[in-house]
Image (cartoon, rainbow, N blue to C red):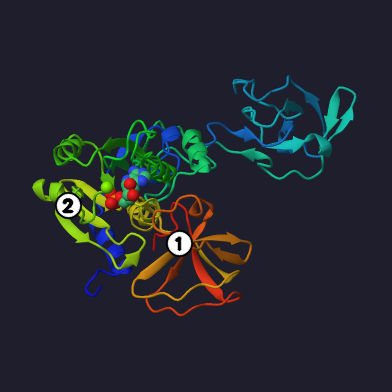
Amino acid sequence: MAGLLEPDAALAQVFAAVPPARSVSLPPGDCLGLVLAADATACTDLPPFDRAMMDGYAIRLADAGAAVELLGEIAAGDGADRVPLQVGQAYPIMTGAPVPPGAEAVVPHEQTRRQGQQICLPERIRPGANIVPRAGECRAGHAWARAGAVVTPMTLAAALGVGAAHLEVHPRPRVAVIATGSELAADPSAAGQIRDTNGPMLGAMFQEAGASVQRQVIGDDAEALLAGLQSISDADVVVLTGGVSAGTHDEVPGVLRRLGAEVLFHKVAQRPGKPLLVARLGRHLLFGLPGNPLAAHLCACRYVLPALRRLARLPHIPVSGRGVLRTTLPANSEHTWFLPALIEGGSVLPLLPFSSADLVQPHQANAYLRLDPGAVEAPAGTEITYTRIGVDAWAR
Ligand code: AMP
Ligand code: MG
C-alpha cells in the first residue's frame, strides 16, 4: 500500500516523542542497571584510614636490614589507636588493618626472617610499600562517577565504599500494559474465549528491560477502555494490545480520539505489525500494538523497548550479527518483513512458515531477520544479517 510510513521513519518518530527523562534519588542498592542523572560525589575518604595491603609487619624505614622487636598484632577491623611505632619496633599487621601511627611501610612476612623474639627486615624497603594511604583512592567531595554512567554491581560497590547513601538516577520507566479483547476471558475453556498471552509476554519483556509494569485486561468496550486509560496516572508509557485495526470492535483509535490523544502515526509498512499506532496521550507515550501475538512481539522489540531505553537514558547498543542461512528464504513483496529466526553458532534458521498469530514456533526465535521490500529469494548458504531479540537489540 503506497503512502504507509516506513519502519525506520516510524522508529525515528517514536524516539522524537519519548518524554523527558525523570530523575530521582535512590539508595545505591536500588540503582542497578539505571543511569546516573548527575555526577556522584564521595561522602567519605576511600580508604577511610591508611590501609595495610599485605599480611606482614608495619615498620620504620630506619630499620631496613636490622632486627626489630615485635609489638602486639593489628588485625582487620581493629582501631588505629596504637602507641606510635618507634625505631627498633614493628607491629605484626594483617591485610585490611589500619596502619599504626609512625609506620612508613608494610613488609610482607615472606620478606622477613625470624630471629628469636625478633624479625630481620630486608635491606631495601620502598617508602609507603604495601600501604594505601587514607583517601588514596578517592577523597570526600570528589566526583567519582559521571552523569550518564550505567550503575553496575561494581558501581554499587564503589558507591558504598565512598559512603553514598543515595545516587541521583533516571528511574525505571513505568509501563502500563492493557490487553484489550472480549475474547480474553478469565475462563478460557468457555466457547470462543482464549487466554491473554500478550499481556504477560509484554509485561515480561518490559520487566526484563528494567521497567516497572502494571497490567490490566479490558474487553472490547469503549467506555471500559476509556475508564481504564483515565485510571492510569503514574505511567510514562502505555502499551495497548489488540483492538487497533479497523474492525467493528476495534475500539482503540476511537477512544484515543475521544481522549484527545495526538496520534503520531497509525500503520507502518511492515509485516507483521502493520496496524501499529503510536500517540501522545497527556504525559504518556502510547503504543497501540496489534493483538496477534507475533505482531505484538515484533512491535514491542522494535519500537517499545528502544523507547524505554531512551527514557531511562540507557546507551543504545545494537546487537546484530551475520550468519549463513540453513534453509531458503523466500522473496519478499511490498512491505519490510521481519522474520523470526534461530541463530545457532554461525547458522541462521528462518522460522517459516508463520502467520502473525503464531506463538509456538516463534518462541524458539532469538533473532529477527529483516527483508526489505522486493528482496529476492535467498538460497541456503547465503550470508545474512540478523538482529538479536533482547532488551537493546533494536535501539539504534
Ligand atoms: P485484534 O488486534 O484485536 O484484531 O486481534 C487479533 C488477533 O489477536 C485475534 O485473534 C485476537 O484474539 C488475538 N489477540 C488479541 N489480543 C490478544 C492477547 N492479549 N493474547 C492473545 N491473543 C490476542
Ligand atoms: Mg480484538
Residue 249 location, x and y as percent?
A: 20, 48
Q: Mark 2 and 1 residues: CB-CB less than 8 Å, in contact?
A: no
The label on residue 318 is 1
Q: Determine if residue 154 is in view.
A: yes
Q: Looking at the image, which residue is at 45% across and 76% down? A: 331
Residue 241 location, x and y as percent?
A: 30, 47
Using the image, determine if residue 89 lies above or below residue 294: above
Amino acid under label 2?
Pro
Q: Looking at the image, which residue is at 61% across and 66% down? A: 347
- Residue count near mark 2 (Cα–Cα under 10 Å), binned few <14, some 14–19, many ≥20: many
Which residue sits furthest right?
A: 116
**For mark 2, what is the residue?**
253
150 or 323, which is in the foreground?
323
- Residue count near mark 1 (Cα–Cα under 10 Å), binned few <14, some 14–19, many ≥20: some
Of labels 2 and 1, the one closer to you: 2
Q: Determine if residue 38 is in view.
A: no
Quadrant of the rendering where the N terminus is positioned: bottom left
> 214 left or right of 137?
left
Quadrant of the rendering where the C terminus is positioned: bottom left
Amino acid under label 1?
Pro
Residue 132 location, x and y as percent?
A: 61, 39
376 or 238, which is in the foreground?
376
Q: Is mark 2 on a helix, strand or loop?
A: helix
Q: Which of marks 2 and 1 is nearer the N terminus?
A: 2
Quarter-of-image position of residue 302:
bottom left
Count numbered badges in the picture: 2
